[in-house]
Amino acid sequence: MLNVKLSREVKVGLLVTGAVAAMIWGMNYLKGIDMFSGNNKFFAIYHQVDGLVPSSSVILNGVKVGQVQKLEFMKDHSGRIVATLLVNKDVFIGNKSSLRIVSSDFLGGRNIEVRLDSNSPKAENGDTLKAESMSTFSEQVTPIANKAEQLIVSLDSLAFAIRKVFNDETSYNLNQTLASIERTSNSLDKMVSPDKGKLALMISNIESITKNIRDNNEELKNIIHNASSISDSLAKANVARTIEEAGRALSETADVMQKINAGEGSMGKLVSNDSLYNALSKTAYDLDLLLVDFKQNPKKYVNVSVFGKKYKEPK
């Protein structure tokens, strides 16, 4: 067996070569290209590829099955663009399937969606598949317009229900409620005036809420879908009675707050009169002195003696 000794330069060269190879493999792996698994290469020819870039995903039924390897102009000077795609060889794609450029986000990103034709034979490596143009703006807006139309119908039903609920009697109760709210707000304003600095924090929280709304657009679609059922439930609810009870509660709260501000009752005296606080402070001080004296002269307060000896004050 030969004992081959490698020089230091050879070892360093092998180490650098291995590191570069590992780095290249890692970069391709992060891009979604597995160099150790087989991929089929397909081509598609487009007139326009706005937003499509190398490494854009190839999607089949919502699952990523490959990615765009490169984009290049055809050599016939027609301005058309050839997209080279790498697709997992284990995924079946019929040779009559089409490749359509679709939006991937609101920032203009694009992916390629496979419109599968499962009845056609499997496409072979190197085949050119049918390319479909990008979806138009109207096609993207149509679902939103349909949702908006449903929302308008639901809002119309909601407005009709509100008109039925808010009759003359309810309007009178509402005015009384608003008057009570005004009186209550005047009373509360005196109590919460030191906390006005919290308004800035509230505004910051509102901005955070609006950002969350933008990030959860999908959930808002479900809210729009359920708007009709909510309007039916609101029409059946006894809103007039609820408003009347709320008005009474707010009116009573305003009366209580006015009495407190005027110094009436126990709560009013606690808020406006300092005598109770001063008395409690003096009592606590006297009790503290008593405890200190008890610790220093315990025999003065507890006199236990067999012969009945009395405690004498220290001189």
Image (cartoon, rainbow, N blue to C red):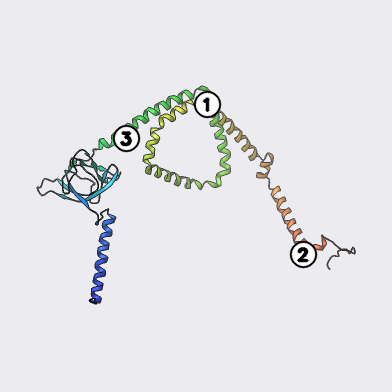
When asked about the image quadrant of residue 117, the answer is top left
Q: Are marks 1 and 3 in contact (CB under 8 Å)?
A: no
Residue 88 percent location from the top left of the image: 24, 49
Above or below, comparing residue 79 to residue 136 in the picture: below
Lower sequence index among marks 2 and 1: 1
Which residue corresponds to the image point at 17% horizontal and 47% vertical from the top-left?
124
Mark whose residue sits in front, 2 or 3: 3
SS of the residue under disc 1: helix
Lower sequence index among marks 2 and 3: 3
Q: Which residue is mark 3?
A: 144
Above or below, comparing residue 244 to residue 194 in the picture: above
What is the number of the mark on residue 296? 2
Above or below, comparing residue 315 to residue 289 in the picture: below
For this rendering, which residue is in front, 112 or 126?
126
Lower sequence index among marks 1 and 3: 3
Residue 57 percent location from the top left of the image: 26, 48
The mark tally for this picture is: 3
Q: Residue furthest right?
A: 307
Q: Where's the C terminus, which quadrant?
A: bottom right
Q: Which residue is mark 1?
A: 240
SS of the residue under disc 3: helix
